[in-house]
Image (cartoon, coloured by chain):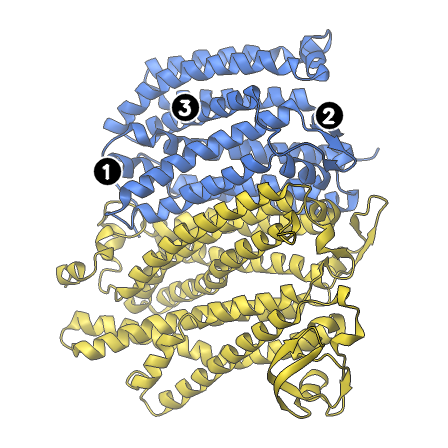
Chain colours: A blue, B yellow
Amino acid sequence: MTIDYALIWAGLIAFAVLAYIVLDGFDLGVGILFPWVKGQAHRDQMMNSVVPVWDGNETWLVLGGGGLFAVFPLAYSIIMPALYAPFIVMLLALVFRGVAFEFRFKSRNNQWFWDLAFAGGSIVAAFAQGVAMGALVQGIPVVGRAYSGGWWDWLSPFSLLTGLALVVGYALLGATWLMLKTEGHVAQQAVRAARVLGLALLGLIVVVSIWTPFLHEHFMRKWFAWPEMALVIPVPLLVLVCAVLFFKGLSQEKPLMAFLSVQGLFVLSYMGLLISFFPYIVPSAVTLWQAAAPDKSLKFLLVGAVVLLPMILAYTAYAYWVFRGKVGPTHHYHA
Amino acid sequence: MDWLDAHTLARIQFAFTVSFHIIFPAFSIGLASYLAVLNGLHLATGRAVYLDLFNYWKKIFALAFGMGVVSGLVMSYEFGTNWSVFADKTGPVLGPLMGYEVMSAFFLEAGFLGVMLFGRARVGPRLHCFATTMVALGTFMSAFWILSVNSWMHTPAGFSQNANGQFVVESWLEVIFNPSFPYRLVHTVLAAYLTTAFVVGGVAAFHLLKMRLQKVALATPERSASQLAVRTMFSMAMWMAACVAPLQILAGDQHGLNTVEHQPRKIAAIEGHYETQARAPLILFGIPNSKEERMDYVVEIPYLGSLILTHTLDGVIQGMKEWPPSERPPMGIVFYAFRVMVGIGMLMLGLGFWSLWLRHRGKLYENVWMLRAALWMGPSGFVAVLAGWVVTEVGRQPYTVYNLLRTADSASPIDAAAVAGSLIAFVVVYFALFGAGTVYILRLMRQAPDTGHAELSVNEPVRAGGIVPPSALTGAETLKGQP
């Protein structure tokens, strides 16, 4: 029996992107919520809740991009030019919010500017990621080994909708993270935000889920043709379960439950996307086997992944453990 | 403006973004090691001065590292957005090396950075020292992998090409340890160490000069502790300069010999030779005249060119005329950039030796001219690194993968307008944000190291948030407020 390295790697890249979404999602969300919380001390508290971990969270994005380059170079070289504008905008936005972490605490006079950079950068980065995802889902024209569309093709009602959905989703992740990690005024604000954002996100998930199968014929077969349907039906059912648990967590003041059930919503939506995509990596154009690098490249990097990824997960978990507990109004990290 | 096509714009954009990026790692590779050494020395000796210095440079590291991370994130996607043909063709070879960089370096740095910056009180001195060492190891691993990638583009090895025109790997060992990699790795890492040493030395010199002016050197125990910290900093930096600068010149020489073997066109541009000749002179200065294919206004030393490049007096050095114009790198940029780099290297060597002499006479901290020179040489490492980078990258032209893939054939199928738009955005954003970052770093450097708070600050929160107390940035006020 031969081992399907391309399939293994598709799973690992998918994992890296998911890890990025569930980890950086909440720290982007904290930035998205910034404008709705007034007061320097409160904002300090919000930022301090993610300061020790945001850098590691963002590294998953580098692994997603770098991993795609390494193991699916054809997909990387088609997708990046196709989604040129959203990716450039996302990168610039991430630069803004990344430096804001450091600069904000060093500048009391121009702090409003770095507040703006942090919030604006977070909102724009989330929106651009959502747009990029939507544009990829709706499809990219390919001729030969290259992208063949124009540089505005990514812009469509669907991609704008997914952009909005991701901003709302990250904001909700951020709100439940703040419920978990802060107390006092910020935590109360977070609960109020979570209620509104939770309803909005569920609505958006429904709309996007109904819209998606109509974009490609093979999406439609996956979700609405028997017997494939039997395999995918648990996904929407579990979404329902997570939604119930989320509101239960909110009303019973169980922040961990609320946080995890929103993460569950993200994992399930992502699973739904993967189910739609498979076996394509660029929908209806390039399958993951067509895009894969030669086995020799896949094997070589797989050795590293098998050894290093568990170590990465272990010391990432350790870092979260070191900085466990709530960030109160008077409790601060300091150098 | 016919020449301003998408491909040219993509080249400008890459040169711009990578030049900005390289400044930060060039500094943080050295600084991470310095922090690990300080932390280790404190653990071993228990002397407070090392922890004071650790806490001082830690804040500066946090800023520089943050800017390196975000500018590096841009690079990892730029291969795809602007150089998609290059990405498709080299992905199977270079992608896994970058994958290893992410997994063995970036995560290591990011995972332990939080503990290193904020976690001392939570994990204790031993684990804190371990975390610092892991961050330093991460910066080194990062240099290892990315320089392997870069070196492969200069001296590709261990590959074949498949039906799609992709490079595929025959031997990973040959790919990773390609012919120019060991030289480039040593040369670049030493450059990072020298850059950091001169920044540290420059900051120390600034404070030594200031203390001298204020004549408050031994007024109080705290002041003398502060002076001890600054002196320790200066002493360490000058030891580094004196030891590493000669090594670097040796490493540069060896790297040059390697380039003679693999990239003779780059050497022709570096040396400014159009004609192939034995007993070649060393051209100290001149103006390349590409129209008439000769050097104008030449100042040269006979035989020295052959002596340096072949280590014999009558060795033959190939001139640029050996190759058709379509194969030549632009001569002027490489020629001048090389002279800037070597000139700075010689100054660094001179300062290092001078410091040894003054140290021997016991005047290292008093000689005003020494301190002024060290202050002015503070940023010299950055200039040298950028110049060296220009020499090697422009000297590789007109190829991305030497002799195999032309730069003109590497770019994405993107409209010039899109590339121009993103280029303008990058220029504006980088200058604004990294300009601000530089200002914040300089403000931190203007503060003398805080002493006597080392262990106190571990147990007692003293500030509003972030990494640096806001009060540390308001200058004189703070100095008054502290003992």
Q: Label 1 crowding class (10 Å Cα cut-off): few <14, some 14-19, many 20+?
A: some
Amino acid type, residue under disc 2 in the picture: Pro
Q: CA distance from mark 3 to mark 1?
A: 22 Å
In the rendered structure, find residue B443 and report the number of the disc placed on it: none
For marks 3 and 1, give the one nearer the viewer. 1
Do tag 3 and tag 1 residues touch (Cβ < 8 Å)? Answer: no
The residue shown at (42%, 43%) is A96
Secondary structure of the residue carrying numbered label 3 = helix
**Residue B231 in view, yes or no:** yes
Tell me the SS state at disc 2.
loop
Q: Is residue B440 left or right of residue A220?
A: left
Residue ID for mark 2: A279
Comparing B25 with A323, the one in front is B25
Tell which of B461 and A66 is nearer to you: A66
Disc 2 to disc 3, C-alpha distance? 31 Å
Q: Where B7 falls versus B251 (above or below)?
A: above
Task: Tell me the chain of label 1.
Answer: A
In the image, residue B446 above or below residue B458: below
- The residue that disc 1 covers is A40
Location of residue B200 in the rendering, given as x and y in whole percent from the top left corner? 38, 70
Q: Is residue B226 above or below residue A142?
A: below
For label 2, the crowd category at 10 Å Cα-Cα, with few meaning under 14, some 14 to 19 and many 20 or more, is some
Q: Chain of mark 3?
A: A
Q: Chain of mark 2?
A: A
Tell me which numbered mark, 1 or 2, is placed earlier along the sequence: 1
Would you identify the image quadrant in which residue A136 lies? top right
Q: Quadrant of residue A98?
A: top left
Quarter of the image with the N terminus of chain A in it: top right
Give residue B3's position: percent from left, percent from top: 65, 54
Residue A172, disc: 3
Identity of the residue drawn at 37% across and 76% down:
B376
